[in-house]
Amino acid sequence: MSDDKNTLAIMLFSELLAADSALRGRLTRVLPKGMEISHFSVLNTLARGKETSPAKLAERFGVTRGAMTNTLTKLERAGYVHVRPDWDDARRKMVGILPAGSRARDDAVAAITPMINKVVETLGEEQVRAALPILREIRLKLV
């Protein structure tokens, strides 16, 4: 790779890392008290679908099974998720969202929506729509 391409790649990833850091900081400030980004991410995923395994959640978020177990334990203690044995294979577990978890997720969405809408409004819908496929492609190439 030439120096120009190296510089371009470094600039791209520097911007992505800076955007990630800024977004995490803003999200942390507006999420409901006691909710972490990882908690919201898991609740948001579970709210969209059926039960899944901790291993699949860990794979989806690119974290270790131990890290996901830690997050799920916190969510279970808060009364947001239910972890049960897999009826087909007792060695595995399944995770589902509880009504309190759905409410907590909805509260978090309500808290972050104004901030996200402001960013979209500032950039303009056209620019955001143009950026989404590029960001999605970058994410998929990194998985």
Image (cartoon, rainbow, N blue to C red):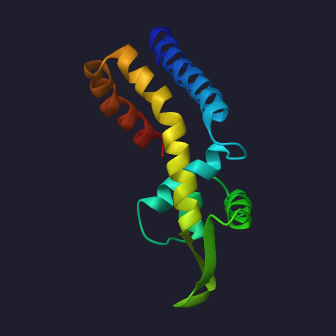
Q: Nearer the viewer, residue 111 or 124?
A: 111
In the rendered view, tell whether residue 13 sits above or below residue 76.
Answer: above
Residue 76, picture quadrant: bottom right
In x, y percent, where is residue 54?
Answer: 60, 68
Residue 130 in view here: yes
In the rendered view, tell whether residue 26 sits above or below residue 86.
Answer: above
- Decide if residue 20 is on the left or right side of residue 119: right
In x, y percent, where is residue 47?
Answer: 46, 60
Q: Nearer the viewer, residue 96 or 53?
A: 96
Residue under the point 50% across and 70% down = 52
Q: Nearer the viewer, residue 13 or 76?
A: 76
Most distant residue in the left direction: 126
In the rendered view, tell whether residue 47 sits above or below residue 5.
Answer: below
Residue under the point 52% across and 14% down = 11
In x, y percent, where is residue 137?
Answer: 36, 36
Residue 5, picture quadrant: top left
Residue under the point 54% across and 47% down = 107
Picture mark count? 0
Residue under the point 67% across and 66% down = 79
Residue 60 in view here: no
